[in-house]
Image (cartoon, rainbow, N blue to C red):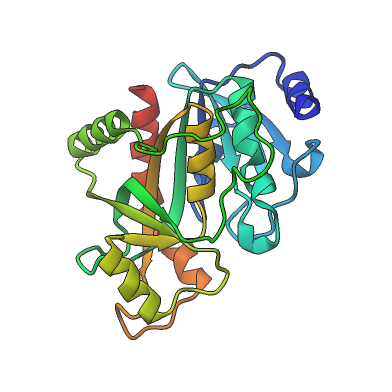
Amino acid sequence: MNLTVNYIQGKTDGFKPEIGIILGSGLGDFADDFKSVIIPYSEIPGFENSQVQGHKGQLVFAKIHGKNVVMMQGRYHFYEGYSMQTVTYPVKIMKKLGIKTLIITNAAGAVNENFTPGDLMFITDHINFMGTNPLIGKNDDTLGTRFPDMSEIYSKDLIKKASQIADKLQIHYKKGVYAATTGPSYETPAEIKMFRLLGASAVGMSTAPEAIVANYCGLKVLGISCLTNYAAGVTENALNHQEVIDTANKVKENFKTLLSEIIKQM
């Protein structure tokens, strides 16, 4: 981990980020507006390449509204065959670099039948249905305790602030629980019905591992889902990844405006 941190610090000339952002499928364009220092994952010791469409696979360091920010243009997914340790390693590195707040974004399917594709949803909690936990293994006492509390993974204060900002900007949003599955296959209609009964409003293949580790590391977390499609069984349409990218592209201007203002008011 020290090798990774030292390499990044050498490339960023002492830049100390205070906010970290993970940009999900189709949402990575936000970082393009604030380019400063860019480091491809392939060049960073300890990092792996991200191979999913809509994920550029690079760290972007920039000053946004006077705040030092590090952004992940693309994340690692468990379904790519990476271990949970690899999936969450960048969160630990961002913590070591100095961030206090992590904004996690994703593309997700709408489980709540009152939600529609194109909605932005602030995550209030999650259901980890991935069958594993990123904290399994030897504990790093420099990052967090062996048995961390998960009562408030997603900061209520940040959700309240983000909601007020969205109201002011007249950007439509929802609030709800995010269900995380491994993928890469989409969920079955029966599974979606189960998630709905459990109280989930959206479903996706990421976020929960990073959020668990961020909370473990003592970071304040804000989660934002871009609902890019209806989950299986909500309509009769088949699901495909291109729909995810296309819908994210349609709402990205609202997303970028909201995210920029959130950073400004942090």
The quadrant where residue 161 appears: top left
User: Residue 206 placed where, x, y %?
Assistant: 51, 54
At horizontal 62% and vertical 27% (from top left) the residue drawn is 36
Q: Say if 159 sits above or below 123 in the image.
A: above
Relative depth, front residue between 8 and 4: 4
The quadrant where residue 88 appears: top right
Label total for image: 0
Q: Is residue 57 visible?
A: no
Relative depth, front residue between 63 and 122: 122
In the drawing, does residue 8 fall left or right of residue 179?
A: right
At horizontal 63% and vertical 51% (from top left) the residue drawn is 76
In the drawing, does residue 178 fall left or right of residue 147?
A: left
User: Residue 233 placed where, x, y %?
Assistant: 33, 81
Q: Quadrant of the N terminus?
A: top right
Q: Say if 194 sits above or below 175 in the image.
A: below
Residue farthest along the bottom direction in this orientation: 236
Residue farthest along the front direction in this orientation: 147
User: Residue 180 placed where, x, y %?
Assistant: 46, 58
In the drawing, does residue 20 fall left or right of residue 141?
A: left
Q: Quadrant of the C terminus?
A: top left
At horizontal 81% and vertical 27% (from top left) the residue drawn is 3
At horizontal 64% and vertical 48% (from top left) the residue drawn is 87
Q: Is residue 55 visible?
A: yes
Q: Say if 150 sits above or below 27 in the image.
A: above
